[in-house]
Image (tube, grey):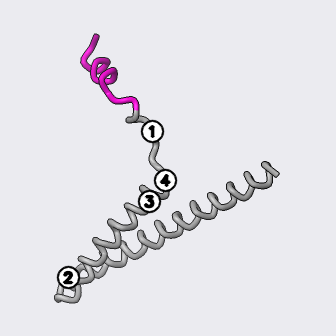
Amino acid sequence: MSTRHAARAAAPETAHIRQNPTVSLQRKIDRVRHARAKIAQQITSGEEWMLPLLKRFNAELAQLEETQGLLLQATEIASHAALHRAA
């Protein structure tokens, strides 16, 4: 048995289970918010060269929040459709 096959055989079965997409997305949003807060503190301390970075983080945060809203909307639509199918 090759090393690669041995490692694959020893890997836990749960390694392939996918996380809830809203949970991982919320973690990304939290990381971006934390980084954005640090950048804002540095900008207010005189590091104005970081303004483009703040702009980029604001855009990324807006995109992540939009994606989160769409995921929540999709979840609501799917659960509503499931209720109608069950009735």
Q: Are marks 3 and 4 in contact (CB under 8 Å)?
A: yes
Q: Position of residue 3 (x, y in %)?
A: 24, 18
| Disc 4 element | helix
What's the distance in space between the residues labelled 3 and 2, CA to CA? 26 Å
Q: Are marks 1 and 4 in contact (CB under 8 Å)?
A: no
| Disc 1 element | loop
Circle 4: residue type? Pro
Circle 1: residue type? Ile
Magenta region, mostly helix, strand or loop?
A: helix
Q: Are marks 2 and 4 in contact (CB under 8 Å)?
A: no
Circle 2: residue type? Gln
- Which one is closest to the eye, mark 3 or mark 2? 3
Which residue is disc 1 drawn over?
17
| Disc 2 element | helix
Which residue is disc 2 drawn over?
42
Q: Please give the name of the residue rendered at 82% of the width and 52% of the height, measured from the top-left corner.
A: 87
Q: Position of residue 49 (x, y in %)?
A: 22, 81
Q: Nearer the viewer, residue 56 or 8?
A: 8
Magenta stretch, residue numbers: 1-13
Q: Please give the name of the residue rendered at 73% of the width and 51% of the height, measured from the top-left corner.
A: 82
Q: Please give the name of the residue rendered at 28% of the width and 78% of the height, measured from the top-left corner.
A: 37
Q: Are marks 1 and 3 in contact (CB under 8 Å)?
A: no
Which residue is disc 3 drawn over?
25
What's the distance in space between the residues labelled 1 and 3, CA to CA? 16 Å
Disc number for residue 21: 4
Query: Looking at the image, how many numbered discs can be counted on the residues?
Result: 4
Circle 3: residue type? Leu
